[in-house]
Amino acid sequence: MSIALIVLAAGKGTRMQSDLPKVLHRIAHAPMLWHALRAGSALAPERTVVVAGHGADLVETSALEYDPEMRVVLQEEQLGTAHAVAQARPALDGFEGDAIVLYGDTPFISEATLNAMAEARRKHDIVVLGFEAADPARYGRLVTEGDDLLRIVEFKDATEEERALTLCNSGVVAADAQTMFELIEAVGNANASGEYYLTDIPGIARARGLSATVVRCPEAETLGVNSRADLAAAEAAFQARARAELLDLGVTLPAPETVHLAWDTVIGRDSEIEQNVVFGPQVTVESGARIRAFSHLEGCHVSRGAIVGPYARLRPGAELGEDVHVGNFVEVKNAILHEGVKANHLTYLGDAEIGRKTNIGAGTITCNYDGVFKHKTTIGEGAFIGSDTMLVAPVTIGDGAMTGSGSTITEDVPAGALALSRAPQQVKPGMATKLMNMLRSRKAKGQ
């Protein structure tokens, strides 16, 4: 059965107190919308339609960044969820299969839950996702009889008896796409909010002799984000789940509550992530690597057996080969460090490629930026870069070459050569004593 996703992302989210559309607020370094789209991708949808409203141009840009093949449609007036879904109909013209409605501000629906909904569709015309709420509050209630869903009642329109129910509506619904749109045509707005509710379609379906049912999921999956407090709770929920998954996969986390992961972090088994490590987007750490405390990684790849940190920073484009050591207060950006490279202290390596087994001394800087252009530094295999070397790019250091400590290297160094570039040292006996005595005298006189 072909699947189409309809992701509702039109809400303004006034309680967020933000000019940014609600679905573009980030959880684990990615917009909430992306989390919802990734959840839906588990069903391998043939088409995906995002319904935008407030800040539609920003929402469209974000959606197309996630998937350039996606369709984004506009809900110009916010007239309710049924009206929002109806805006997707032209984008699904000619589509034959099921449509599943998801929400850009409900980012944690699991693959297992969506598969359960797809399976339930084999027996029922309408499938609604529900959950048992610890505090039903103002959720819509699901009125059931056995496996049958009789109707969904919004809290504002519910009787006291209906409000006593704890089986609540998540808003997620699946049906044959054309059937869903036909049912939506019959939805009215004679309710307390004057809106066209998607929740009306199970009742309309049953009146037409169609069947409806409920698939249940844990309440945590249905967490919606409507405020900054909700956003913080969603971040905490994501981090807790992601850490638990890493532990189950065989990653060592001595203090898991201090490690912060991105939505797409990949870490191999038998790796160790020490305390207070932060992962930005697009990081892969291979098996057996060790990321030491207080390091920050984003847009990088760390190979097997590498050691990073403590207090290291890997920026986008950093590629660390096997058994590379990057130590304290070392920053690597857009640079390839091949197998066995060591840069253990106080170093910046940007726009560079460094050969196997090369040692980078403390205080080394690749001077890669001239104020307009970035330039590359290339260092061969088995080279030794002395402490406090300034490598003024573009420059190449050959295999087995050395630079003297404190050198400023502006020209290429051949393989096996030693490059020195220092001002001659001058020693003036007794001058330090005379100078300090003069300065102390001036201070005493208040000068």
Image (cartoon, grey):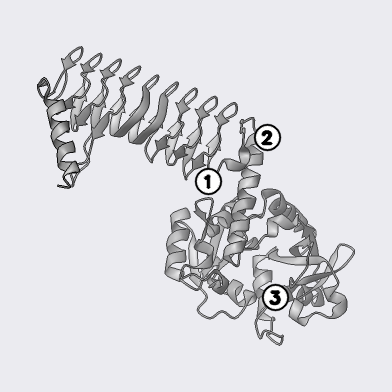
Q: Residue 173 carries which label?
A: none
**x, y percent for residue 345:** 36, 27
The answer to whether residue 65 is above or below residue 188 is above
Three-letter code for the amino acid on which mark 2 is drawn: Asp
Q: Give the position of the N terminus as an image quadrant.
A: bottom right
Q: What is the secondary structure assignment of the residue under circle 1?
A: loop
Which residue is found at the position 61% from the left and 47% from the top?
Answer: 239
Location of mark 1 (residue): 262
- Kindly indicate whether the residue at mark 1 contacts the one at mark 2 (C-beta within 8 angstroms): no
Labels 2 and 1: the sequence-earlier one: 2
Labels 2 and 3: the sequence-earlier one: 3
The answer to whether residue 186 is above or below residue 143 is below
Q: How many dots with numbers?
A: 3
Tell us which disc is closer to us: 2 or 3. Answer: 2
Q: In this view, does 145 lie to the left or right of 390?
A: right
Three-letter code for the amino acid on which mark 3 is drawn: Leu
Labels 3 and 1: the sequence-earlier one: 3
Q: What is the distance, in whole Å, between disc 2 and disc 3 at their CAs?
A: 44 Å
Q: In this view, does 139 lie to the left or right of 317?
A: right
Q: What is the distance, in whole Å, between disc 2 and disc 1 at their CAs?
A: 18 Å
The answer to whether residue 281 is above or below residue 216 is above
**x, y percent for residue 177:** 65, 66
Location of mark 3 (residue): 183
Which residue is found at the position 15% from the left and 23% from the top?
Answer: 412
Q: Is residue 253 left or right of residue 380?
A: right
Location of mark 2 (residue): 248
Tell us which disc is closer to us: 3 or 1. Answer: 1
**Location of residue 48 by image quarter:** bottom right
Q: What is the distance, in whole Å, between disc 3 and disc 1 at their CAs?
A: 40 Å
